[in-house]
Amino acid sequence: MEVCDMNNIVSRLVLSIFAPKTPEKRSLSIHQEHELLMKLEKAGLLPQDAQRVIDSKGNAVAEEMLYVLRNGVFEPTKSQKAAKEIMGNNFFGIEDAIEHFKLRPTRSEIATLQDVPFSEATLRACKDTHVLVAVFSLSILEMLSNKMLQPLFSVGDTEKAPWFKKEKFFWKEGEVRWCLIRKNPEDDSFNEEWVDQLSRFGMHSDPARVRMAVYAALGHFLKTGERMFAEGMARCAELDESGRRITVGPFKEDGLRIQAWWDDSRAYFVGAASAHKEE
């Protein structure tokens, strides 16, 4: 019969508690860390600056510094500056997405948006009726999950998931691009079936994608306080699983609504959302 060695058991238990832990694998050498600190001090780093980094919740300040280091500080291009000058408050650019959506675009995304794909003549013709938006790849799910944007949605009972949670358009991300989207449906597109509304678009416009319409409406409101799609429902390009067309609006005090409406129905409060084609 094996004899229990208490001294050995206690010894192993103590070692398991107080044994030195394996140090974490470091990506920087001590020499690199010293050189980095020297460079920061030479650039003017003060003790209170260092303490702010140390004390920041969730290491947010350090992550922000690393983002700038890797992606640079955003500087608008000549094309973007010219478009902003024309559109005025109806411009929601990269810097606006950074400020109001708290996005952190990559170099690749910023490069994709370098040139605004609309002529000066088009922008001047649309400067009062449309919003020019730098749209990033956020899905509506990501927008609804964003603490800055969540209060701007009207989803009814907050204890329940929104009706569109299981719909494909809710989960779908999109390409990074500029979008010139009409702030409200054309007046003569209300009280018509979808097939008749389509004829109103003409050769220069397409039905707006719901993701872009929502993105534009939320961003424009955060920047200016103006509500797009304020008075009624605007049909978008997508259908839900039952074949109804997705609509955005109205955008009232309780938030932006996302609903659905049959294509062959007409109502005085149902128009069509349109976006100008790229040139």
Image (cartoon, rainbow, N blue to C red):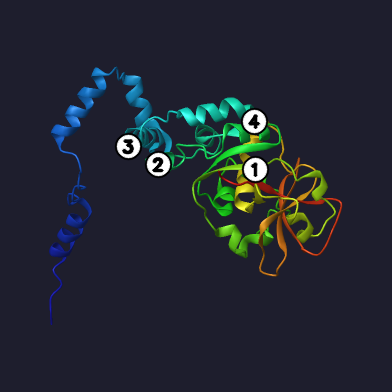
Q: Are marks 1 and 3 in contact (CB under 8 Å)?
A: no
Label 4 SS: helix
Distance in Å between CA atoms under marks 4 and 2: 30 Å
Q: Residue under label 2, please give it.
A: 106
Q: Position of residue 131 (x, y in %)?
A: 64, 37
Select label 4 or label 1 by which is in front. 4
Q: Residue under label 3, please give it.
A: 70
Q: Residue under label 1, please give it.
A: 181
Select label 1 or label 2 by which is in front. 1
Quarter of the rendering containing residue 216: top right
The answer to which of 56 and 8 lies nearer the viewer is: 56
Please say if 221 is above or below 18: above
Q: Residue at x 50, y 35 (%)?
A: 94
Q: Residue at x 72, y 38 (%)?
A: 227
Quarter of the rendering containing residue 120: top right
Which mark sits nearer the N-terminus, 2 or 3?
Answer: 3
Q: Residue under label 4, please give it.
A: 124
Which mark sits nearer the N-terminus, 4 or 1?
Answer: 4
Badge 4 density bin: few <14, some 14–19, many ≥20, Cα 10 Å: few
Distance in Å between CA atoms under marks 1 and 2: 24 Å
Amino acid type assigned to the residue bearing label 1 in the image? Ile
